[in-house]
Amino acid sequence: MIGNRPQFVKAAAVSRRLRERCDEQIVHTGQHYDDELSRIFFEELGVPAPSRELHAGGGTNTAQTARILIGLEPIIEELRPSLVLVYGDTNSTLAGALAAAQAGVPAGHVEAGMRSFDRGMPEELNRVLTDHASHLLLCSTETAMRNLEREGAAGEAHLVGDVMADVSLAFREIAAERSKVLEELGVEPGEYLVVTAHRAGNVDDPERLRTLVELLRALPGQVVFPLHPRTRERLEAAGLTNELGDVKTTAPLGYLDFLQLARHARAVLTDSGGVQKEAYLLGVPCVTLRDTTEWVETVEAGWNVLVDLDRDAAIAALERDPPTERPELYGGGHAAERVCEVVAAYTQRL
Ligand code: UDP
């Protein structure tokens, strides 16, 4: 069950491997459906084509979750899978786990146990509720395992590592060969900053969005900002598009271009969970435009600094030298193998 950009990346790690052991059917909920956020990820990363598509994108979180739930019920009824696998923390994740549980089918949650402890984030609600509806909890980190234990989650928890790390490691050299993004944008390795921002908490409120724009304008050197459609829309609605000054905005990039651009950046500034992890794996310092993170190990290791939208704190964070050490945190590229082993063993026991 997949539906948005980071989920296509996660499925790229798991799907082909899973098909070596099980009959996998992909359901695309349509949360992201355009070429830039969907099609290119299937093509570049070789995600198998979905066998069902729901076209349930758009609308509020509640409306979208409801539409996905309604769309999934007959599909689960028809396919009667042994397990429904969901990824991450989106509306598709929660709806997938809930629809499965209500149909009496076990759900497996990849990236279980992640917590920001900020219930104001729609993603946090999705994480908590999905974990408590799932039978199989596939965790990226020890911290996630501890979070689930503390909450008394009833499902079976396994530490598998992080499947996004598998993709980042596997595609790094492919991106280096195929992507011309640095030349296309006219930037030099090590001399620019990459920004991504699209969390509701940063872009939905025009005042917060203005603070973000001011922060970006104050950053030193060349800034490249691939705009998520949500952010582009909110900037336009708030009349802030022309306030970005010298910040170089682009359309959302494909995975290979983004990987190559992030890899050679001086630092990354982001409110994305996936991008915080990817920066760490690439050895690129990260400045997180939030005051909490689920990926606490990157902060503890000294590679990530949480600044919320504090301009001076962001600039100070960029002046720090990165640590000399970068411990292996996310499974070293073997997470999908472990997910498939655990899923195969679990379904055989049913
Ligand atoms: N990404 C991309 N192009 C971009 C920005 C991000 O391919 O222009 C990738 C990034 O490498 C990561 C994923 O999209 O793998 C993160 O997605 P997003 O930030 O939408 O999700 P989050 O992690 O915040 O849930």
Image (cartoon, rainbow, N blue to C red):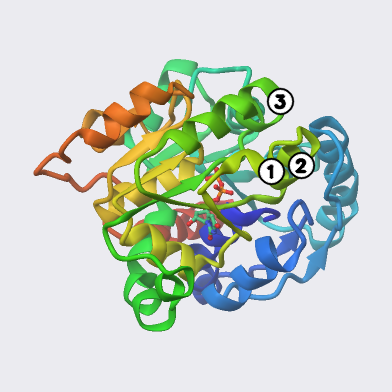
Q: Quick check: marks 1 and 2 in contact, CB under 8 Å?
A: yes
**Quadrant of residue 143 within the rendered picture:** top left
Toward the viewer: 113 or 9?
9
* Residue 313 - label: none
> Residue at label 2?
236
x and y, in percent, of residue 349 in the image? 53, 52
Q: Secondary structure at mark 1?
A: helix
Toward the viewer: 64 or 347?
64
x and y, in percent, of residue 144 in the image? 40, 31
Q: Secondary structure at mark 3?
A: helix
Toward the viewer: 312 or 24?
312
Q: Is mark 1 within 8 Å of ligand 1?
A: no
Give the CA separation, mark 1 to mark 3.
Answer: 12 Å
Earlier-in-chain disc, 1 versus 2: 2
Q: Is mark 3 within 8 Å of ligand 1?
A: no
> Residue at label 3?
206
